[in-house]
Image (spheres, helix red, strand yellow):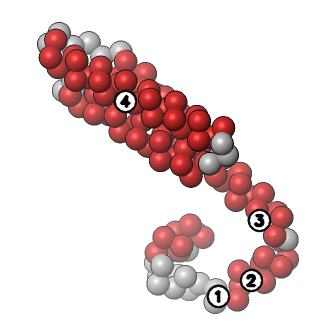
């Protein structure tokens, strides 16, 4: 933990703050019980999945409501929106298969395609 800044951030430690040694988390796990930690972890994952899904849906909504006159540009935008919607559907399929890690990737791709549509519109 002393050298890993991502872990320091996740655990709430600043870069210059002393951190507990490696045995702290093993002791914590014994006190809290593994089942409770798994439950907390699953709640965090569910929150991330929900947030990523919402970001993708909002981005698609924004892209869907673009007003572009240029027909060639409009086709590129529509293609990106279609790809965004396809990735969103695939994310939902991954969730149905209980694969939140893959769903998060699909949500990110959905968001990215929607953002590309907005960028193509010059907004």
Using a 10 Å C-alpha cutoff, classify the residue at mark 4 as few (fewer than 14 neighbours), some (14 to 19) or many (20 or more): some
Q: CA distance from mark 2 to mark 1?
A: 7 Å
Ranked by sequence position, the earlier of labels 2 and 3 is 2
Left or right placement of residue 41 versus residue 39 in this view: left
Indicate the secondary structure of the residue bearing disc 3.
Answer: helix
Residue, disc 1: 22
Circles 3, 1 touching at the beta carbon (< 8 Å): no
> What separation in Å lies between label 4 and label 1 (alpha carbons)?
45 Å
- Say above or below: 96 vs 48: above
Q: Is residue 55 visible?
A: no
Judged by depth in the image, the label closer to the viewer, 4 or 1, is 4
Name the residue carrying label 3. 37
Q: Is residue 6 visible?
A: yes
| Quarter of the picture holding the C terminus | top left
Circle 3 crowding by C-alpha within 10 Å: few under 14, some 14–19, many from 20: few
Q: Which mark is residue 26?
A: 2
Q: Earlier in the sequence, mark 3 or mark 1?
A: 1
**Residue 22 appears at what percent x and percent y?**
64, 88
Taking the spot 46% from the left edge, 75% from the top edge, the residue there is 5
Q: Nearer the viewer, mark 3 or mark 4?
A: 4
* Percent of width and height locating residue 12: 58, 69
Q: Helix, strand or loop at disc 2?
A: helix
Q: Position of residue 114 (x, y in %)?
A: 35, 30
Is residue 10 depicted above or below 19 in this figure?
above
117 up-or-down from 4: above or below: above
Q: What's the residue at 83%, 79% (across, down)?
A: 30
Q: Are marks 4 and 1 in contact (CB under 8 Å)?
A: no
C-alpha separation, residue under disc 4 versus residue under disc 2: 45 Å
Residue in the picture at 52% in, 69% down: 9
The residue where tag 4 is placed is 83
- Is label 2 in contact with label 1 (beta carbons under 8 Å)? yes
**How many angstroms separate mark 3 from mark 4 (CA)?**
37 Å
């Amino acid at each position: 933990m002393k050298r890993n800044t991502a872990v320091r951030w996740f655990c709430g430690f600043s870069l210059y703050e002393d951190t507990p040694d490696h045995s702290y988390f093993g002791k914590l796990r014994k006190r809290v019980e593994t089942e409770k930690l798994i439950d907390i972890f699953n709640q965090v994952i569910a929150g991330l999945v929900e947030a990523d899904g919402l970001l993708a849906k909002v981005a698609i909504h924004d892209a869907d409501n673009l007003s572009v006159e240029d027909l060639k540009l409009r086709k590129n935008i529509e293609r990106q929106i279609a790809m965004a919607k396809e990735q969103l559907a695939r994310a939902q399929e991954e969730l149905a298969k209980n694969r939140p890690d893959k769903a998060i990737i699909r949500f990110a791709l959905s968001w990215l395609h929607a953002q590309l549509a907005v960028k193509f519109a010059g907004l």
